[in-house]
Image: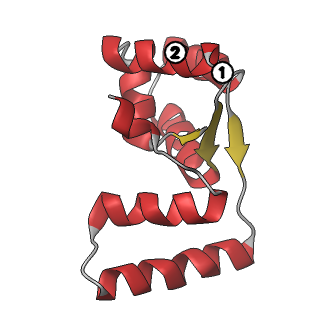
Amino acid sequence: MVFALDTNIIIRYLRNDTAVVKNFRNAVVANHDIIIPQAVSYEICRGFRLVTATRKKANYDILLQDCKIAEMDVPSWERAEAIYENLYRKGAHGRKCDWNIIGTLTRTSQIFSNMV
């Protein structure tokens, strides 16, 4: 199984949210693939540049040892835009819509936030 982490889940992990940390460890032990979309990694790292969060940055680096960054090239971003537009027109909005896009682009079968 493949899990994709969003910004909110990573922030909760870095804040040592018991449920998130437990579920992450369970996914690692079960040898599931865990991905972080490139845009999410950008958001997290951008935040580290804005505040002094040395311990959280160190914890993020540790987290990355068990994850893969899902890089997206320009055609993938363009495809994401088209998928978003299609889902939006069908009534899907917000976070659920974004995860459907990531799931389609990375072929994930389940999203990590469902585990919380």
Inspect this view and state whether residue 14 appears: no
Quarter residue 91 falls in: bottom left
Q: Nearer the viewer, mark 1 or mark 2?
A: 2
Mark closer to the chain start, 1 or 2 = 2
Q: In the image, residue 109 lies at what x, y percent?
A: 54, 49
| Mark 1 touches mark 2? (CB < 8 Å) | no
- Which residue is at a point 65% across and 57% down the rendered structure image? 106
- Is 79 on the left-hand or right-hand side of 101? right
| Quadrant where the image shows the C terminus | top left
Residue type, numbered disc 2: Asn
- Which residue is at a point 62% across and 13% down the rendered structure image? 29
- Which residue is at a point 57% across and 54% down the rendered structure image? 39
Mark 2 crowdedness (10 Å alpha carbons): few <14, some 14-19, many ≥20: few
- Display coloring: secondary structure
Q: In the image, residue 70 lies at what x, y percent?
A: 69, 50
Q: What element carries label 2?
A: helix
Quarter residue 103 falls in: bottom right
Quarter residue 86 falls in: bottom left
Query: Mark 2 — residue?
Result: 26
Q: In the image, residue 52 lies at what x, y percent?
A: 47, 22
Residue type, numbered disc 1: Asp
| Quadrant where the image shows the N terminus | top right
Q: How far apart are marks 1 and 2 (CA)?
A: 19 Å
Query: Mark 1 — residue?
Result: 61
- Is 16 on the left-hand or right-hand side of 34? left
Q: In the image, residue 45 lies at what x, y percent?
A: 57, 38
Q: In this view, does 27 lie above or below 104?
A: above
